[in-house]
Amino acid sequence: MAAKQSKFLVGALLIVGAVGYLIYTSIQETKVYYFTIDEFLLNRTTLANTDVRVAGRVQAGSIQWDPAALDLTFRLMPIEPGTIPVGALPPGVAVSYQGILPDMFAEGRDVIVEGLYTPDQQLVASTIMTSCPSKYEPEIEG
Amino acid sequence: MTHLGTLALYLASLLAVYAIVTSLWGVRTRRTAWIASGAQAAYAVGGCVVVASIALLHALLTRDFNVEYVASYSSSTLPLHYTVAAFWGGQKGSLLFWALIHCFFSAVVLFQNRTRNQELMPYVTATLMTIALFFLGLLCFITPPFERLSFIPSEGSDLNPLLQNYWMTIHPPALYLGFISASVPFAFALAALATGKLGDVWIRTTRRWALTSWFFLSLGNLLGGRWAYEVLGWGGYWAWDPVENAAIMPWFTATAYLHSVMIQEKKDMLKVWNMTLVILTFVLTIFGTFLTRSGVISSVHSFTQSGLGPYFLAFLAFILLVSIGLLLYRLPDLKSANEFDSLLSREAAFLFNNLILVGLAFATFWGTIFPILSEWVRGVKITVGPPFFNQVNGPLGVLLLFLTGIGPIIAWRRASWSSLRRQFTIPLVVGLVLGGLLFVLGYRNYYAVVIFSLAGFVLAGILAEFSRGTRARQVMLHESPPQALGRLVAKNPRRYGGYIVHIGVVLIFFGVAGALFTIEKQITVSAEQSFAVGRYTLHYTGITEREDAHIAAQIATVRVLVDGQQIDTMHPEKRFYKKQNQPTTEVDIRPTLVEDLYLVLGSYDVPSGLATFQVFINPLVSWIWIGGLILILGTCVIMAPNPAERQAFALARTSADIRGQAVAE
């Protein structure tokens, strides 16, 4: 009896092991560090050539968009100004993106940028996510 | 009306408390009058929640913008059906909707069992009312849906445009039905643990509920995929977003349960495992609700960041504590009556299927909460996205597909070589020939080749089962083929309905594998320019504008040509919802059985007249929806009334009663 049951144990352990292995290796291969823009700016020197996800605010007046080439550049800024001492850090980070703009993308919006931080201090975005509008408190005119 | 609604919610909470206390007190003191009173109170809770729901609907339909919820989620120009959908379009309303469905299900359960399962029912009532009380408590004290503003806005800020879609009006209710009906098997499982009546009865009583829950979870996930595909406009239907994960995790464990419960019915084994799966499924539904409401994990679907998180966590902890405590307490009584015999048996296939399904649920769970875990443990937030889930769940899914081809047709207990040969020759030959054929035809995407040949393997096995059964009836009972097929299914709807569900699942796999061949292109063109994508030539003619009180739209006209012949005209749109001040993308999809042409108007630059398009060619996507329909059909067959099942159930109940009486005497 015991031998018979141990076959099942081995089979079960194989599956559990496979699941564990898949999870472990896949996390190693696909992980992306998630920072707020403040954390990102603090750690930026160590992050060159790393895949990161950064949450921040699109700086007003910084958007440059070429609809023919689908080229976008803008600056990602801290959401609450004044959290970092003036002069201690660069004011935000330059983001470049190739592709179609998300519907909700606009100046002053909070966005999450995912991409590669290059050694020349640019964030080359692969995706730009805009916060869902239902998260905003609705503006009701009185 | 709204005062009445608020009052009804408070009254419902009090009645729920009363129902819990009297039910449990009635059991303790063995007073049936108390228990009956508890059940009556549970019906009354339902009545109160109905009143509150009518009050909210009334406020929405009369456009009472003084009510904060109405002002936030509707407007005077919102069409009627979306105004009704606004009931579950926002946080507070959806919680009330949840309570409404939960109370409805509770009432149905109480009515179904008004003369049966008398020992289990007090605990069932108490459990269901505890769950109701949690949601009622939130509605009374944390997120009151009838809260009024200090002023009367002239206009509401409208329902989120992304929610103003046909699929969105029916997808959340379907998912809620699935989530909420999972609480019925859970309540019976707890009752079985509490009373020690751990036999077949609670399982057979809740079989239909478990199936119903699974049915709606499947439907909700499919509709959610359909909604994402048509509305979100990124070209796909599934992105492993936390909210999607929240919906698929209980589906995984519920699927595992529906399989492993057969082993308990047949062999009296895996009792602890089945209990665990029922509890886990329910816990995952609450966890899923927590994920969507708390804002702990960023998602495109999150509701307003509200302070609900801690309450859900506390409730989750409470559920886990009670369930695990009871389970441990009864552990000695949950011993298996049998052992596994052979790896070549249906038990083994089901066992491994269960492990993989739970593995899928766990991997999905792990990936979803990884940002939180990594922040706790290492102080850095690390996220994983769709690549992670595809890398883990893809191979597990393929393994599951393989077992789908084995489980239903391999013999119970121990399969002999001759039976294996008889049953697996056809499927194996079909699978291998299909795989070989694809290879010879030049397909070098091995992932796809494996999935397609496995799909052939599984389908061949199922169709062979149908043909064997039909032929046997033709020979023995001299029935015509359609008659034989019909009676075959009618005689054993559970088995053949299950096969039909499997056909649906295989087709879904087939459709999902099509994503391995997706083509995507982004291009900017001016009017009367053409461009090629795949086998299509797209000719952009220009933009027309349309405007009403609700929406302003820019509509592109694109002619679709193949080999110089026009086959269709498509109209992707860019819309601007005025009330919400929000642009949205309306994709146009040209579906065929081979591939969908999926056209997005990315942007339209008015000064230059340049239009940017994003085009996807999505092979085989239609098969996902076809497979979904077949899956739904199969589930309906399984749930069809079944005399054999009723007999077995009656037998189980009488034998349990006799045993119960013997113990009592």
Image (tube, coloured by chain):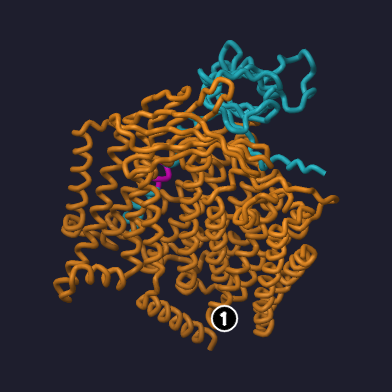
Chain colours: A cyan, B orange
Q: Residue furthest top?
A: A120
Query: Would you place residue B508 above or below residue A117 in this image?
Result: below
State whether residue B24 appears in this view: no
| Secondary structure mainly formed by the magenta segment | helix
Number of residues whose C-alpha sits closer than 10 Å to that of mark 1, classed few (under 14), some (14–19) or many (20 or more): few
Answer with the quarter of the image where residue B560 lies. top left
Front-lying residue, A76 or B207 = A76
Front-lying residue, B486 or B156 = B156
Asked if residue A14 is among those painted magenta in the image, a careful observer would answer yes
* x, y percent for residue B598: 43, 37
Asked if residue B264 is among those painted magenta in the image, a careful observer would answer no
Front-lying residue, B176 or B414 = B176
Would you say B479 lies left or right of A107 here?
A: left
What segment is highlighted magenta in the picture? A13-18
Front-lying residue, B258 or A65 = A65
Secondary structure beneath disc 1? loop
Number of residue marks: 1
Image point 30% across, 59% down: which residue? B408
* x, y percent for residue B558: 43, 32
Query: Would you place residue A75 above or below residue B366 in this image?
Result: above
Amino acid carrying label 1: it is Arg
* x, y percent for residue B322: 63, 61
Image point 66% across, 64% down: which residue? B132
> In the rendered image, which residue does mark 1 sit on?
B114
